[in-house]
Amino acid sequence: MVVTMREKPLKLLWLEALMRRLLKDDVEFHYYQEQYRRLDAGFAGEQKIDRVWHELIYPNTFFVLHNVCLVNTAQHLHQIDTLFICPQFMLVIEIKNIHGRLEFDQHTHQCTRTKVDGTVEGFPNALTQTERHIQFLKDFFASYSLPVEGAVVIANPSTIIVNPSNTLPIFHVSGLHKYLQSLFKKHPKKIMTDNHLTQFVQGLLAKRTIPQIHTTIAPSRFRHGVLCPKCSYQNNMYFHRGIWKCSFCHYRSIEIFAEAMLDYRLLVSHCITNQQLRAFFKINSNDAATRLLRKFQFPYTGTYKDRVYHLPENLLEHMKKFY
Ligand SMILES: [Zn+2]
C-alpha cells in the first residue's frame, strides 16, 4: 500500500496569504473570501477522507494519489482530488465538503446547495466533473486496459443528497469501504503485476503539472510589512535588534518573518532585492536587510549592488533551518 501525502494546493496557500493582507474595503475582498472558504472547506473534506485509506485492508499493492493535475490534448487542466489505483482498476474520487441540502438537476446539470437558512447557491456539478475526468483518463491511458471508475464522495455527514445521478455513484464517506469492495467484485482480474503498476504510477506522476496562479493583485491593494498574527494580521510589527515586535500588542517573534516572506513569494514575486525587502517589510536599515538576506542563505544572482535573491519553493522549511 502506498498513500501519498496531501499537500495544500498552491491556490489555497495564495488565498490564505491574500486573506491575511487584502484590505478589508477592497472591492474584491468578499469575492476572494468566498473562494477561500470554499477551497479551505474542500481541503478539509479531502483530509477527512484520507483517513479512510489508512484503514483499508487489501492484500495487493495500491496507490492513493492526491491532487493529481494533468493536462489534456486541448491543454485543459484535469485536477483530480483523489485517484485510487490498484492492479484491477483505477477510481477517480471527487470530494465535496458542502453542508446543507445538495441537489442535482439531471436536465440542466446544475448543482445547488440550500443552507439551513434557506439561501440557495450554485456549485460546480461534481458528477459532471467526475465524468469528464473518467473520460480523460480512459483516453490518456488507452494503451492500458485498466478500467476507470468514478464516484463523488460527500465529506460532511450532515449533507442531504437530493436527486443523485443514476450514472455515477454519489455517497457519504461512510460508504466508501463498501463501494470499494463492490469494485473489487466487479473487477476481479488483475490487469497488471505489482511491478507494472508501480511503473504505471511513476509514469503518471511524471506527467503531472503544477497549476499556476494567473491572477495578479496590485501590491497597493494589500497590506505591506510583517503583520502580527496575534492581532489577526491587522497590525504591523517592526524590526528591532533581530526581533519582530508588534506595535500594538507587543507580541515578539523571530520566526514570523518566514510567514511574511511566504506571503511576499505568493503574492508579489519569487525574487527579492535588498531595496524591495526594505520597502515591503518596512525595514529602515540597509545593513539590517542585508544581514537578514544573508542569514537565510537564499540563492542569488548578480553582483553585490544588484543582487537578486531567489526565494525557494520550500521557503518555510528552508528558513526554518536558520532560526
Ligand atoms: Zn499584535
Image (cartoon, rainbow, N blue to C red):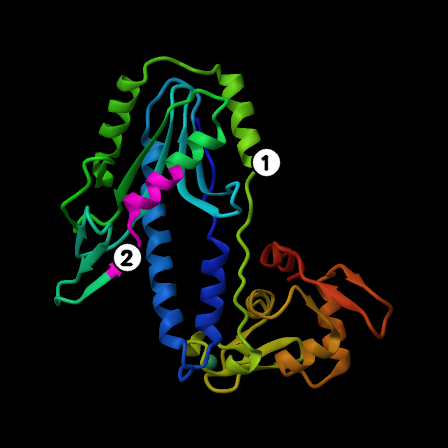
What's drawn in magenta, residue-wise?
Answer: 122-133
Q: Residue furthest right?
A: 303
Q: Is residue 261 above or below residue 41?
A: below
Which of these two is toward me, 223 or 142? 142
Q: Amino acid at mark 2?
A: Phe
In which quadrant is the N terminus drawn? top left
Query: What is the x, y in percent for residue 126?
Result: 30, 47
Q: Which mark is residue 71?
A: none
The answer to whether the residues at label 2 and label 1 have Cβ atoms under 8 Å apart is no
Query: What is the x, y in percent for residue 295?
Result: 73, 65
Q: Nearer the viewer, mark 2 or mark 1?
A: 2
Residue highlighted by disc 2 = 123
Query: Where on the picture, by quarter, is residue 254?
Result: bottom right
Q: Is residue 143 above or below residue 71?
A: above
Query: What kind of secondary structure does the magenta stretch mostly adopt?
Result: helix
Q: Classify residue 287 as left or right of residue 12.
A: right
Closer to the chain start, of discs 2 and 1, is 2
| Residue at x 32% of width, y 34% of height | 150
Residue highlighted by disc 1 = 206
